[in-house]
Image: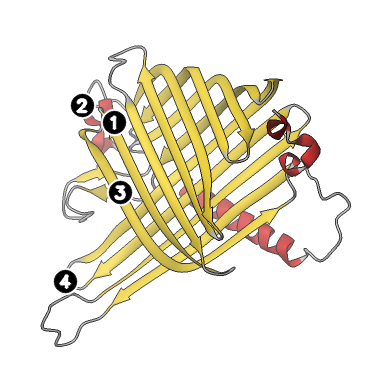
Amino acid sequence: MKKLLLLFAVSIGVISFAQETNKDIPAVDSTKAWSIEGQNTLMLNQAAFSNWVGGGANNVGWLAGVNYNLTYEKNKDLWENIIILGYGQNNTQGIGTRKTQDVINLSTNYGREVAKNWYVSAGASLQTQFAAGYEDGNNPEALKISKFMAPGYLNVGAGMTYRPNDNLTVTLRPANARWTFVLDKDLQTAGTYGLKNNGDSSLFQFGFLGTAIYKVKLMENINLTNTASVFSNYLDHPDHLVLAYGAVLNMKINKYISSNITLDLLYDHNQIQKTQLKQTLGVGLGYNFENGKKRSERKDNQSWQNK
């Protein structure tokens, strides 16, 4: 499955590049039902020391990722799909190779407009990671704490989506099923990721899920994307909320070089009863593209501006 995900991401990148190459060919209709926005990044970092009295260890690292938003807009239909894949490693002399980034985040949400900017919607999402993680800084000799689909989180639900423009999407699902999968037998112990018994491979929850995406253009070529979510389990301890917030600051230097700063905050009572934090900074190759003029970019369709 991991290979299929990577192959899928590469395929989209190739298709988008081919479309960009043929951009000089006049289009029959510049307003398309499907629009694609995406970013492909490859960040590299390296440090070397020789007789440096301040100390330091030679190291080299890399981080690769893709972030795609595929949107279908036609009449009263709205279908948004998000693909986020990222993986990175750092090799430090005397310590070895450790992963610095590892994320698989796939989501889809279909809505049918029932009122101005409001949609009855249903969707699903999947979150996991590619490789194993270890308690001591991803040291393979330390205690293993995660692996592909261990944990893996699958959400399926229905509710309402509010989308006044391309920069803000809020989805509220009062009926949401959430499965936590732990498919590694070494991690299938009671209490790990909320599992009830030794040998359990999954945990079922049903409750409320709220998500939001808010994009801000701070200045030319500098954009901030905020994401947030909250989940409450109706069936057991609804006060034990799962809270998540993510921020991606993208600073585009030119068409092929960009800098990214990311921040992720997470609190999940079933994982660890502490706030988790992850932050990354990278400068490297970044290819951004847009394909197709969105329906919402047409002035006669921007009803949210005519309030």
Above or below, comparing residue 76 to residue 17 in the picture: above
Label for residue 268? 1
Q: Of discs 2 and 1, which sits in the foreground?
A: 1
Q: Is residue 130 visible?
A: no
Compare marks 4 and 3 and give the one earlier in the sequence. Answer: 4
Image position, residue 281 (x, y; %): 36, 60
Image position, residue 188 (x, y; %): 25, 32
Above or below, comparing residue 179 to residue 56 in the picture: above
Label for residue 94? 4
| Residue 80 left/right relative to 263 | right
The CA distance from mark 2 to mark 1 is 13 Å
Please tell me which residue is depicted at 80% across the width and 46% down the height of the picture: 31
Above or below, comparing residue 110 to residue 160 in the picture: below
* Element carrying mark 1: strand
The CA distance from mark 3 to mark 1 is 14 Å
* Element carrying mark 3: strand
Q: Which residue is mark 3?
A: 278
Image position, residue 72 (x, y; %): 70, 38
Compare marks 4 and 1 and give the one earlier in the sequence. Answer: 4
Q: Which residue is mark 2?
A: 191
Compare marks 4 and 2 and give the one earlier in the sequence. Answer: 4
